[in-house]
Amino acid sequence: MATFRLYKTSITSGNDISSYVYDLGQFSYRINDDFTFELPELQFSTTQYIPEGTKLFLCDAADVYNKQISFYVQKYVYDVKSQMLNYTCPHILQLLADIKCRDIPAPAVGDSFGDWSNIVPDFDQYNNQTNYALQGQLVWARSYYQAIFLIKMLIHRVAGTSIASIDASALEGKDSHYIGRYADGGSYYNYVFPYDELGLNIPCTLRVGTVTHTDVSATDFWALNELPNCLQLLRHVCAALKVSIDIFRSNYALEIVGVSASADDSDVLGFQEVTLDRYRKFAASAGRLTGGSFDWEFGEWAVGGAYTAYTYGVDSPDREVVPDRAEDEDTAVTTTRSLSTTFMDFFRIYGLSVSNYQSAVYRIFNDETDQTEMDDYVAALKAFWEQYSVKEKIEVEATGLVLRVPYVEYDLAAKIMRYERLI
Amino acid sequence: MIIVPDILSPVIRTTAGVSYTLTNAICDYDIDALDAEVVRSVLNGDQALISRGEYFGGEIDYYGLSLATYLAMKALQGAVVRLWPLGSGAIGTTSPQYYYPYVDVILSSVRPYHRNSKLYLDAVIITFTSQKYYTLARAIDNGLGGGA
């Protein structure tokens, strides 16, 4: 039988409060149908006083340093009758909800990211450089976070995990579901973007979720309050990359959303099958912001020619992977039997072709044979979900902290794990 | 009794300062009744005691009382009085000076009954519980000032 431990502040024997946890709520982690995720929240009762903000580590006793899930104390209530403190502890990544996207740093290349990164990212991970003369001859105004680096940076910011130790090996060098098509010598060639060649434009990222490019400068309290937060951004980046974060590992392994393996039959305590709606559609129609004046630029320098600035950075369809949908959603697909995911305004994934001398331009298509522009994210997700018709709900003895997608729930007080898998 | 040298008749003292020594009383005390709960960790099964305190309760069966004493006792039902359960006074040869323990109790019921005996025809059963958490111990004063 697996055993679990709860530590406060840090994982040392003196901080082990397992002996004083008298009631422990269930917690769950869900990868939604649109590949965004819902974070767990731990609730427990103890006689120990733990100040607000303290980190908590719920660990698999067999491997406390690697198999753990981090929470933080958000609030506690003292129950006089039972003489216990009842704690509410969201997952550590929930802290991102308190940080606005506009506060993500965008320093010049090579400068410090402060609390946001404990490394100086390489050129293929990050660039914020407007001096075109330094960037080769055929240059798009480079200003991007590599998507994987951005995910790592967001995790590092709140969890403190070293960026170098966040495991993205399942993605690095691996093909994403985004395909580019380029012309060379009159012929067209396909190019599958690896995960590490997907990026987010910096000015877009800082303005994500706003309506105009000036909203980001809000000083009014309420306008400021409405600005999107980094947790929303992280959800959308993971969704656009079809990636999940293994929050049950200290290295926050990034993994392509897959399907859980079945438990051994002997382990199954409860079982239920639910038929999935086969028709799942993710769609919205494109919208574009026009007019206004710009206070930042994203554009192209033609060889020996003039500079062309793009409107808010969105007018480069050649590099745009996930377009803006929010302002004009296609309600035709928002029916009870379909799903619609709507990315925030200004949310863009771009194909990066990184070179410190020259960068190439790609058009992005639905797949290798269909040359229809991949102007939405529908196809990839729909194709994924259409493979599955049944969802199994399984209950087994909790034998350790293991991520199961799309849904896993731990009831450690009862030593039970419930999860779902698609078949 | 290790707390006091001799167990004497209990004494009740009202808020008005009237004392009654309950001579011949038969006492059944529930001393240091623990108000506590054993809790168990759901993670590793370790147990702990959450202790809130101790109460002093019990009942006194008081024989041979007069009608006047009975009425006085009955009038105290529901009231808080000071009780010297083991008798009152100073405990000799202690330094510093200690006294017989006392505790403020709520007289939760005062019930008379008749016993068909030639010695004690009428009696009253007084039940009580301490007003606050109280652990039986020698007192540092005689208890005649303040309190109930």
Image (cartoon, coloured by chain):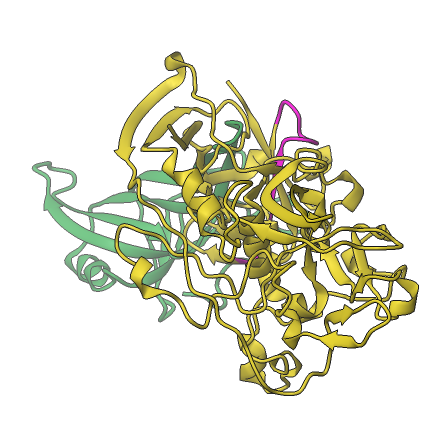
**Spot occupied by residue A24 in the image (x, y as percentages of width and height):** 46, 40
Number of callouts: 0
Q: Main secondary structure of the magenta part?
A: loop
Is A270 or B8 nearer to us in this picture?
A270
Q: Is A253 one of the magenta-colored residues?
A: no
Is A318 or A155 nearer to us in this picture?
A318
**Spot occupied by residue A88 in the image (x, y as percentages of width and height):** 50, 53
Q: Colour of chain B?
A: green
Give the quarter of the image for residue A65: top right
Residues shaded magenta: A61-75
Q: Which chain is yellow?
A: A
Q: Residue at x 38, y 68 (%)?
A: B17
User: Looking at the image, is A90 positioned above or below residue A386?
Assistant: below
Q: Residue at x 73, y 57 (%)?
A: A145
User: Looking at the image, is B62 positioned above or below residue A416?
Assistant: below
Q: Tell whether A289 sits left or right of A273.
A: right
User: Looking at the image, is A381 positioned above or below residue A2?
Assistant: below
Is B115 or B135 nearer to us in this picture?
B135
**Spot occupied by residue B137 in the image (x, y as percentages of width and height):** 53, 45
Whether residue B108 appears in this view of the structure is yes
**Spot occupied by residue B1 in the image (x, y as percentages of width and height):** 49, 33
